[in-house]
Image: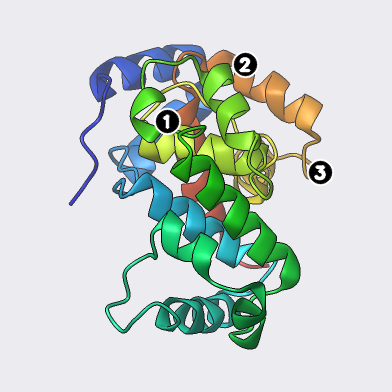
Amino acid sequence: MAQRLRFSAAAAYRSLRAADPVIGELIDRHGPYKPRPSGDPYASLVRVIMHQQLAGPAARAIMGRMLALFGDDGHTPTPKAILAMPDSTFREAGVSRQKTSYLKDLAAHVADGALDFDALDPLSDDDVIHRLTAVHGIGEWTAHMFLMFQLGRPNILPVGDLGVCKGMKIAYGLRSMPTPKRAKKIGAAWSPYASVASWYMWRVADTVTPD
């Protein structure tokens, strides 16, 4: 099921077409903006931590072994359950010492209310980033993805995302991958709908024909 947008897609298309003909052409080519569905915010952060610095198959295998520690239903363990599990048991399942510390820090923040997902919605983008990155193992990229796909914020420009930068290189005919500074300059015209334009950069990166 597609995510219900918290802003007008039609208004976003009008704004982006007027501001940047490149994005206008991409809207025509790739069709409507369809962000991935949002889910349980806590579970999504656990999944992000488990997938850091690992290829997909390896991450899924370790994730499966980690979930099996807590039962066979495949559900994300509660913060209380993660905090109660010995570090050595995580390591036996293939979860690194570092990732175990990240999972437990996330669990502690949620358990004691320092990270209250229900309280994030009315906050500014910057305040949400500040709350999320207070958890060890959650950086700006993860916070940006959370803002875009969990909270449905319309004006997020993840200049540290490889897919967005690759899309910029292709769409704008750049000779090399843009630096964060150049990516911000390109994306400045997209405000207040940078999230939508960034999604089209991912579409470009997904569909480029190899040389």
- Place of residue 32 in the rendered image (x, y in percent of width and height, measured from the top left): 28, 38
Whether 142 is drawn above or below 207: the answer is above
Please name the amino acid that badge 1 sits on.
Val
Relative to residue 74, is residue 65 drawn left or right?
A: right
Q: How far apart are marks 3 and 1 (CA)?
A: 24 Å
Q: How crowded is mark 1: few (under 14 residues within 10 Å), some or many (20 or more)?
A: many
**Residue at left 29%, top 15%?**
11
For this rendering, which residue is in front, 153 or 95?
A: 95
* Residue 78 image-quadrant placement: bottom left
For this rendering, which residue is in front, 24 or 100?
A: 100
- Place of residue 160 in the rendered image (x, y in percent of width and height, measured from the top left): 70, 40
Residue with the mark numbered 3:
175
In terms of sequence position, does the residue under pointer 3 or pointer 2 come before the other? 3
Label 2 sits on a secondary structure element that is helix
For this rendering, which residue is in front, 71 or 172?
A: 71
Residue with the mark numbered 1:
196
Q: How crowded is mark 3: few (under 14 residues within 10 Å), some or many (20 or more)?
A: few
